[in-house]
Amino acid sequence: MTEAPTLLIIEDDPTLGPVLARRLTRHGYQCQWVDNKTDALLRARQWRPSHLLLDMKLGEDNGLSLIPALRATLPRAQMVLLTGYASVSTAVDAMRLGANHYLAKPADTQALLSALAGTPVALSEQAPDQPLNPKRLEWEHLQQALAQHQGNVSATARALGMHRRTLQRKLQKKPQGEHGPVGSEA
């Protein structure tokens, strides 16, 4: 009898984390769920899971900053970054830092299982062939600038020529939808 693969779910949403754990347990994974960066690193070192499902936004922390430490601790683990804030720049950063896959929320069970298995996940067919919404474009630009400054909000604000608090407010807002009217969500 083979042992079930182990999966550490790092998700700060108190509703989504347990739902993901139950859903993936039904598909043969032994799951543990944590909701913050400190517990994630501790549990990864102690439990040594074979798979990681990491949310990009963990409260005030950025899940991207966890990838190098998790990769150093678990070099062979299959790591999937799951985000409600999908952008091309963060996808590139996630892969460069060591994530194996990058999925946008909401991700269906089959996409999660494929990514965790290391199988390529088909791109969504939902996005029509339209230009990016200007507010979404601004959000992606801010994310790219933030990544260039290693998540340092003050340095990013200086580089963009804006007040730090203005940048913080813009970063706290959910990104606008990639397509369609202002206010639609990705």
Image: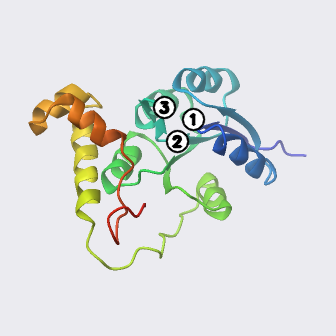
3D distance between C-alphas at marks 3 and 1: 6 Å
Label pair 1/2, CB-CB below 8 angstroms: yes
3D distance between C-alphas at marks 3 and 2: 10 Å
* In the foreground, 97 or 153: 153
Label pair 3/1, CB-CB below 8 angstroms: yes
Q: On the image, numbered disc 2 is attached to which residue?
A: 55
Mark 1 burial class by Cα count in 10 Å: few <14, some 14-19, many 20+: some
- Residue at image x 37%, y 61%? 183
Residue 59 badge: 3
Disc 3 element: loop
* In the foreground, 155 or 80: 155
Label pair 3/2, CB-CB below 8 angstroms: no
Q: Residue 98 at x, y = what percent?
A: 44, 41
Disc 2 element: strand
- Badge 2 amino acid: Asp
Mark 2 burial class by Cα count in 10 Å: few <14, some 14-19, many 20+: many
